[in-house]
């Protein structure tokens, strides 16, 4: 088997399969790709992973791991700023703590971000090598459904290509930040989300364009770090498509923390000035700041993959069409992750990759069920959700009951000075089968798991309510709101 560190051959050549083992070639080393590679290798397949931007992909190197590491620092500052009710005082002055009492060394924060991302990438590479996966550093593209051509990493040196004959192909190439032609990123003042970690000093005034998950998370984090923040939102409220009550809590939190939200506004252009940026809205209004983050979603990185030549169907958006076991329109070719447009979540990409390999290699497999996917938004407070939504109930899509319990009655929340947040449970009418849930709280991303299990295993509210919880704990509210379904049934 090829040594993982071996460079691409100097002359083009075709590499046939080795022996009777099936060969799996994976293009893309993010969660969808590396989880698929580990699964395939553990099933005895000869497995080759082709990656041109670093093992771990955007999730590890420029997106999920870096952003959540930055947010971890912001969380600490946020806790300090809200700890005056806990009796914590400045040792010298005896004053209540506040965000202004601490400074952030952003260069040190970003060095830690990059160090942790690199370490995670190295850990993943070590796991791949341990399982016998061959890692080729280069740009992969299809040459039909059963051949993958590997070029130099920039995708331009066809003379140095190698062609791999293969039985199964998985495309896991991810997505890149969407940008406006009138606001091209420069990596210094006009930034996309991959470029924030090169900053050495905290933006004095960060303008965030886009109020979806990425925009909301960075607006929340940089305000906690100490930046003045203006959020440009094309909608009336932040987080369009999210639970309305959860969005309201975050909108109120933004107002209380001093985030300026410019609602029903769209950015037309962004340009540099001598010492900052000016964002011009379509209304003609101008917003001046020190930096601007363009958080406008992602574009699938499917150009140059040879999809059309291989007959792989794509959507108008450029996303690869897949079914619930990750198959594309071409036999033997699968796809996973952000390039499919299913859910832009690392956990979903990883599951899609594993499902693809189980299916391709003949294992029994359960298809991806969207209503069992848990997601989280790492703002302050966090927002986590799973299953159907309250809007589905309101629209008559499903017949259900919606139960809500604020955290203001939870004893652990009172002890920790938590004054905002709630638990929402959606159960089927009559049977009380748990169909969905929303948690708004610190560490909601951790608290959603019991409800995710309930949705996946079709547990009832009574079963959730009858499960022991620790007292005092925030999880107590997860069971308490379920008991309300039981009480409703007996009224």
Image (cartoon, rainbow, N blue to C red):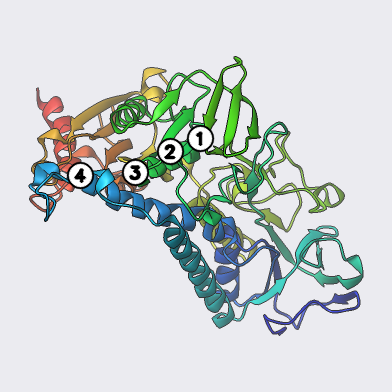
Q: CA distance from mark 4 to mark 2?
A: 35 Å
Q: CA distance from mark 4 to mark 1?
A: 40 Å
Q: CA distance from mark 2 to mark 1?
A: 7 Å
Q: Earlier in the sequence, mark 2 or mark 1?
A: 1
Front one among 202 and 207: 202
Q: Which-is-in-front pick, marks 4 and 1?
A: 1
How many numbered callouts? 4
Q: Which residue is mark 4?
A: 464
Q: Which residue is mark 3?
A: 224
Which SS class for mark 1? strand
> Which residue does the image show at 86% across and 70% down from the upper left?
161
Q: Earlier in the sequence, mark 3 or mark 1?
A: 1
- Residue 377 seen in render: no
> Which residue does the image show at 34% across and 46% down from the upper left?
452
Position of residue 119 relative to residue 259, above or below, is below
* Location of residue 329 in the rendering, given as x and y in whole percent from the top left corner: 74, 47
Which SS class for mark 4? helix
Position of residue 154 relative to residue 408, above or below, is below
Q: CA distance from mark 2 to mark 3?
A: 9 Å
* Location of residue 294 in the rendering, given as x and y in whole percent from the top left corner: 58, 37
Q: Earlier in the sequence, mark 4 or mark 2?
A: 2
Q: CA distance from mark 4 to mark 3?
A: 35 Å
Q: Are marks 4 and 2 in contact (CB under 8 Å)?
A: no
Q: Which-is-in-front pick, marks 4 and 3?
A: 3
Residue 34: name its quadrant.
bottom right
Q: Are marks 3 and 1 in contact (CB under 8 Å)?
A: no
Q: Which residue is mark 2?
A: 219
């Amino acid at each position: 088997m090829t040594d993982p560190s071996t460079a691409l051959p100097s002359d083009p050549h075709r590499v046939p399969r080795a022996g009777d083992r099936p060969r799996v070639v994976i293009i893309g080393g993010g969660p969808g790709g590396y989880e698929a590679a580990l699964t395939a290798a553990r099933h005895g397949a000869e497995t080759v992973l082709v990656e041109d931007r670093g093992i771990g992909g955007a999730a590890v190197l420029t997106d999920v791991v870096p952003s959540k590491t930055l947010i971890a620092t912001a969380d600490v500052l946020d806790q300090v700023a809200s700890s005056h009710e806990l009796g914590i005082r400045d040792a010298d002055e005896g004053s209540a703590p506040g965000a202004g009492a601490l400074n952030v060394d952003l260069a040190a924060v970003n060095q830690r971000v990059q160090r942790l991302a690199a370490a995670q990438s190295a850990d993943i590479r070590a796991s791949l090598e341990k399982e016998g996966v061959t890692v080729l550093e280069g740009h992969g593209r299809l040459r039909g459904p059963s051949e993958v051509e590997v070029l130099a990493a920039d995708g331009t040196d066809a003379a140095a290509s190698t062609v791999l004959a293969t039985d199964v192909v998985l495309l896991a190439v991810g997505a890149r930040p969407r940008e406006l032609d009138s606001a091209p990123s420069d990596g210094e003042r006009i930034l996309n989300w991959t470029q924030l970690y090169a900053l050495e000093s905290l933006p004095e005034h960060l303008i965030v364009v886009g109020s979806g998950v990425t925009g909301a998370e960075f607006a929340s984090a940089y305000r906690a770090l100490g930046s003045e923040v203006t959020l440009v939102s094309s909608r009336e409220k932040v987080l369009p498509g999210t639970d309305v009550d959860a969005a309201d809590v975050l909108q109120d939190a933004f107002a209380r923390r001093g985030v300026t939200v410019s609602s029903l506004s769209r950015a037309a252009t962004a340009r540099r000035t001598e010492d900052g940026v000016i964002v011009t809205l379509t209304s003609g209004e101008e917003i001046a700041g020190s930096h601007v983050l363009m958080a406008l979603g992602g574009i699938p990185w499917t150009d140059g993959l040879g999809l059309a030549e291989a007959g792989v169907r794509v959507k108008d958006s450029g996303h690869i069409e897949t079914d619930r076991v990750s198959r594309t329109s071409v036999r033997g070719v699968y796809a996973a992750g952000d390039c499919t447009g299913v859910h832009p979540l690392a956990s979903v990409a990883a599951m899609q990759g594993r499902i693809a390999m189980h299916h391709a290699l003949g294992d029994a497999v359960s298809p991806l069920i969207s209503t069992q996917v848990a997601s989280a938004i790492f703002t302050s407070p966090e927002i986590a959700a799973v299953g159907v939504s309250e809007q589905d109930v309101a629209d008559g899509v499903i017949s259900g009951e919606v139960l809500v319990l604020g955290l203001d009655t939870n004893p652990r929340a009172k002890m920790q000075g938590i004054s905002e947040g709630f638990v929402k449970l959606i159960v089927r009418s009559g049977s009380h089968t748990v169909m969905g849930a929303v948690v708004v709280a610190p560490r909601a991303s951790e608290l959603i798991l019991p409800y995710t299990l309930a949705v996946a295993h079709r547990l009832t509210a009574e079963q959730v309510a009858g499960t022991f919880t620790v007292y005092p704990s925030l999880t107590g509210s997860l069971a308490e709101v379920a008991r309300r379904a039981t009480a409703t049934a007996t009224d």
